[in-house]
Image (cartoon, helix red, strand yellow):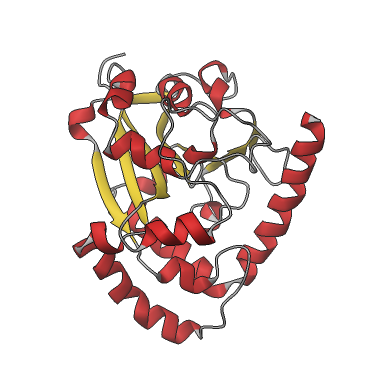
Amino acid sequence: MADDLYEHDLRATLANRSKLKANVNLMYWYEQLYRQLFASEPGFNSWRVLEIGSGTSPLKLHFPSIITSDVLNLDYLDLVFDCHDIATLSEIPDNSLDAITLTNVLHHLRDPIRFLRGATRKLRANGSVYMVEPYFSLMSYPLYKLLHHEPVDFSIKRPILDKIDGPLSSSNQALPHMLFFSRNNWQNEIADCYDLSRTKRSYFSAFSYMATGGISRRIPVPPSIYKMCFKLDQTMASAAPKLFASFFIVRLFALGEK
C-alpha cells in the first residue's frame, strides 16, 4: 500500500511540475518569493544550501548551485531521502551547510520537530533554516479552509500528522502557523537547537498566489497586468498581515556552538 501511495504522489509531482512551468504568473510569484528570501543575503550565491521537498520547486532554475532533495525518487534531484532522517544522511557532511530551505513542505511532514532538530546536525554554527508556509489571516483563512484541498486542523495537541497517506497527500496546513505563532510550548522543543530570540518572520503575498490559479488550474490574467498588481498585493500583505497575508516566512538560526 505504501508503494502505491508513493507512486501516486510521484505521478502527481511530475504532473504538477509541468503545470508550474507552464504557468507564467506562478513562476513570477516564485521568482519574487526567492528574491525576498535570498536576494538581500550578501554572498548567497556562494552559500552551500540544501532544499528539502524540491519536487515541484523551481528554486534551482534561479540558483543552480542549490542541492535539491525529496523523499520521492525523481531523476532530476541531487538527493533522494526522508528528511526526518537528515541527521544521519551521509551524503551531506555534518556542519557543512550554510542554509536549509523549504517551501510549503513543513506542513506535509509527519514530525516537523524531529526534522528541525535533525537539520541542525548539518548546519554550520549560525546557519539558517528558511521556511515558507501558509499564514492564516482574516482574508486567507476561509480560502485555505474552504477552497484548498489540503486540510486545516487547529485542534491538534501535538505537531504531528497522525494519518499518513503519502508524502504529498498527507498534510495539515495549520501546523506551521501554530508552531510559530501560537504554540510556544512546541517551539520550546527546538530551543536547545536554535537561537529563538533571533527568529525572523515576514509575510508574503495576499491575493496574488490565488490569482495565478496555483498548481491545479491557471487563471488567464495577462502577465503584464499580474506583474503590475503584484507590488500592491505584496504591500498589502506586509502592511497588514493579519488582514491580508497568505504566506509567512520564518528564518531560524542554529545555535552558535555545537
- The answer to which quarter of the image holds residue 125 is top left
Identify the image quadrant of the C terminus.
top left
Give how far across and how far down residue 200 sits, in percent: 24, 42
Q: On the rendered structure, is 76 left or right of 26? A: right
Where is residue 163 drawn, in percent x and y? 61, 31
Measuring 39% from the left and 69% from the top, which residue is drawn there? 207
Q: Residue 118 placed where, x, y %? A: 46, 20
On screen, residue 69 versus residue 99, left or right, reads: right
Is residue 182 or residue 209 the one in the foreground?
Answer: 182
Identify which residue is drawn at 31% across, 34% down: 252
Front residue of this view, candidates 152 and 192? 152
Q: Is residue 97 shown left or right of residue 15?
A: left
Q: In the current view of this chain or complex, which residue is farthest to the top?
A: 258
Q: Residue at x 42, y 38 (%)?
A: 175
Query: Which residue of the protein is positioned furthest toward the front in this rendering?
Result: 155
Q: Is residue 36 left or right of residue 95?
A: left
Q: Nearer the viewer, residue 148 or 20?
A: 148
Note whether residue 38 is visible.
Answer: no
Residue 88 position, x and y percent, is 55, 16
Quarter of the picture containing the N terminus is: top right
Q: Is residue 135 visible?
A: yes
Q: Residue at x 31, y 60 (%)?
A: 245
Total of numbered circles in the picture? 0
Q: Is residue 113 above or below residue 170?
A: above
Quadrant in which residue 195 is drawn: top left
